[in-house]
Each structure stands twice: as C-alpha cells, then as structure tokens.
Amino acid sequence: MKNIQKTDKQVYKALTAEIKRQNEGIEMIPSENYVSKAVLEALGSVFTNKYSEGYPKRRYYGGQENTDTVETLAIERAKTLFGAQHVNVQPLSGAPANLAVYSALLNPGDTVLGMDLSHGGHLTHGHPVTLSAKIYNFVRYKTKENGTIDYEKLEELVQKTKPKILLAGFSSYTRQLNYRKITKIAKKVGAISMMDMAHIAGLVAGKALPNPVPLFDVVTTTTHKSLRGPRGGMIMCKKEFAQKIDKAVFPGLQGGPHMNNITALAIALKEAQEKQFQNYATQVLKNAKELERGLKKRGATLCFGAKTDNHMVLINTMEKWGLTGKQAEETLDAIGITVNKNVLPDDVRGPLDPSGIRVGTPAATTRGMKEKEMTKIAVWIDGALTNSINKKEIARIKKEVRTMCLRFPINKDKK
Ligand code: DSN
C-alpha cells in the first residue's frame, strides 16, 4: 500500500487499522469472509477504469474486447458450477439482484410469498421498510415452533394468496429447506419459484449442501458471503426468463457494471471449482456443528429447533445471559469476536437492540480454523457473556482470542 501511504495518510491509517482488526479478531458474522489475494488484486485492477453498459458482444461503448472476455468467463463458470441455464453477473449486490427479478417478472401490486424477516428471511423479501414492499404485495410465511417449515400450511397460504412468485431463502435461518416441496407447491398454482441462496452459495458450490439452481425458476445470490468472492450479486434463471431479467438489470435498474468486481468474480468462481474449496465448504458445516454443540453444552438457547444444517447459529442471548443482542454484540466485540445482533422469530424487541445474535463459521474456516478452535470459541462466547461486566475476565479472554488469531493470519492463501 505504498502509494496509498504516500497519497492519503488518513485513509492509510484506517486501512492499516482494519488489517490489524481483521487479523487479531475472529470474524463470525455469517455473511462475511476473506477473499484470496487473486480476488483482491482483480478488485484493484484497471478494469475499474472501464464503462461497459450492455452485455458481452452487445455493448454501448467501444474498447470491450477484454471486458467481454472476463464477463463471459464469469458467466460460463457460474453456469458450470451451479448448473444454471442463464446467468447475469452484473447486479451490484443482493438487494439490487432481488429487485431486478421482481421488476422483471411482476407488475405493481402482484403478490410475492416470502419468509418473514424475524423467522430467518431477508429485508428484500418483503419487509415493509423496503421500496419493493411499496410496489408489490408481499405476504410472509413463518417457521413452526420446532424451527421447520410447515409445508402443508405453506401450500394453503399459496392457494389462498395465489402469489406470482413463491420466494425461498434466508439470512438467519439455520435449517435446510425442502426445495422439491417448495417448487412443487409453486408449480401447483402456476407461481414462479425463486430462491435467494446468498448465504449458502459457497456451500452449494462446494457441494456441501444441495443445489437449488436446477430446481427453481430463478435463483439470486450475493457473491461475497460463503462463496468468498468480491462484493456483488448474481442472478441464475431458466432460459425463458433470461431476456426479461437481463433487461431489468440493464437498462432497467443499473448503468455500467462494475467490471473490476466481475473480473474478481470470475476468479472466485474458478477457485470455487477446486477440490480445496469443497474441503472448505465441508469444514464450514463441521465447524458450525461444533459451535452448535459447544454452545448447547453450555446451556445456550439456539433458535430453529436448536439445530443448524448450514453455516450459522442464531442464539437467544436474553435467556441464558440476560443480555440483549446489542449488549452481547458489544461484549463479544470487546474480546475480539465479531458477530451481529439479530432479531429472533417474532422478537418482541426491535432490530437495533433485538434478543439475540447470529454467529457463523465461513470466515473463520477460510482462515484454517477447525473444530478444536470452534470448541474454544464456544467457551469464550459463554465466558464473555457470563462475565460481561467483569473487565479483568474480558481482558483475559481477549488476550487468548488474539493469541489464537495470530496463528491463523488472514493474508495467507491456504484455502
Ligand atoms: N447483510 C446480509 C447479511 O448479513 O445476511 C444480508 O444482506
């Protein structure tokens, strides 16, 4: 970063502080990860200088011979990895990807059935604060007491509300969805089936979880979560929806694609085809299971039947420790474990200070941490939340966290 150091001391200071923070703490926000050096290089490459509205071979500006190469590589690699008929790699992130699908396939006022945010869904799946909820009619379904989805009830709701899109997918749900049941229900009423697999895309690519892409009409994802690529979004769909979706992304919602991100995505998708990536994906699940076990052993209350089938756990911090999600997040920040406060199913508290936290394993796994480290992390989480006002104990745990982290540097490509 010699040039940044020379040009801008303030930014340099923040950047070096962030490198230290990432190295000396454990990243356990389930949607975060560490990209490879190759992906980072591509993000900082000269492709950031280029405008390339349109799609490969159909651009509006000249000088596209190299942008066409990288965008085509990204598309073809995504098709191979996920078995997709059509791929659009231009959405700037997950929210614009979802909005593009809605605007491509719905008319204002049309109904979408999506998972309730507090039951694991996502803001862009119809939360009233979003623009899409003002345009379309979102109806939300919930999970059962035991954390699973009542598919018979879902079918009743679908029959009653006749949605144009039946949407699956989540940002804090820890269980495996039954893709076949969901797509079958959608078919019965002639609804388009859509899955937002942002959280688990890397686990699907690494063959650790079932692949929804061949089953659903449309699948959206971000590219920077478990998939370990640059920040961005992607839409995969059946051929019949391709034209509408491409048009909705550009020129419908976006202008020039961020070609440096698309270049980085092409690289990340190549990395995701390697055997090492499959080992990583399998280890992410093993680590989450160990975290689940360690926390349950210490009496923590976990949501969704106290079980995880994926990379994260949702913890009720009020029940065992009497701490709100915000207090728990701050306490864990103080020991160097980064998590995020999160609402729980039908939470009586608000999103800025909810009743729990969300903890996930992709980033720690990328760093090389395994079950042994997860056991320690569960002990540290419980120790810190139990002793949140004991400064000496918090300082002691922080030291242990830092010592362990330094054994797993973030800037090593050992995936
Ligand atoms: N912010 C993402 C997450 O943390 O799950 C979802 O958009």
Image (cartoon, rainbow, N blue to C red):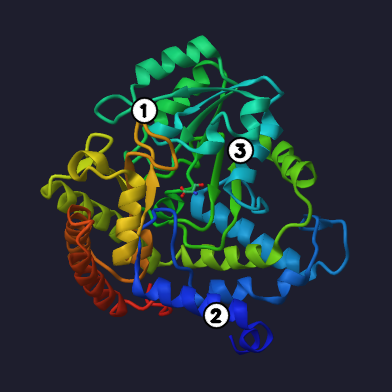
Residue 58 location in percent, x, y? 83, 54
Q: Which mark is residue 102?
A: none
Residue, disc 1: 346
Q: Is residue 192 above or below residue 326?
A: above
Q: Of callouts 2 and 1, which one flags the residue occurring earlier in the amino acid sequence?
A: 2
Q: Secondary structure at mark 3?
A: loop
Given residues 46 and 78, the one toward you in this image is 46
The image quarter in which residue 238 lies: top right
Residue hosting label 2: 13
Q: Which quadrant holds the N terminus?
A: bottom right
Q: Secondary structure at mark 1?
A: loop
Q: Residues within 10 Å of mark 3 (few under 14, many from 20)?
A: some
Q: Amino acid at mark 2?
A: Lys
Relative horizontal placement of residue 205, taking residue 282 as reference (left or right)? right
Callout 3 amino acid: Lys
- Image quarter in which the C terminus is found: bottom left
Q: Are marks 1 and 3 in contact (CB under 8 Å)?
A: no
Left or right: 4 in relation to 30: right
Q: Identify the image quadrant of residue 383.
A: bottom left
Which mark, residue 238? Answer: 3
- In primary-sequence order, the first of circles 2 and 3 is 2
Of badges 2 and 1, the one in the foreground is 2
Give residue 43's position: percent from left, percent from top: 62, 71
Distance (Cα) linking label 2 and label 3: 47 Å
Residue at horizontal 18%, vertical 54%? 382
Disc 2 from disc 1: Cα separation:
42 Å
Q: Is residue 170 visible?
A: yes
Residue in the foreground of this view, choosing between 12 and 2: 12
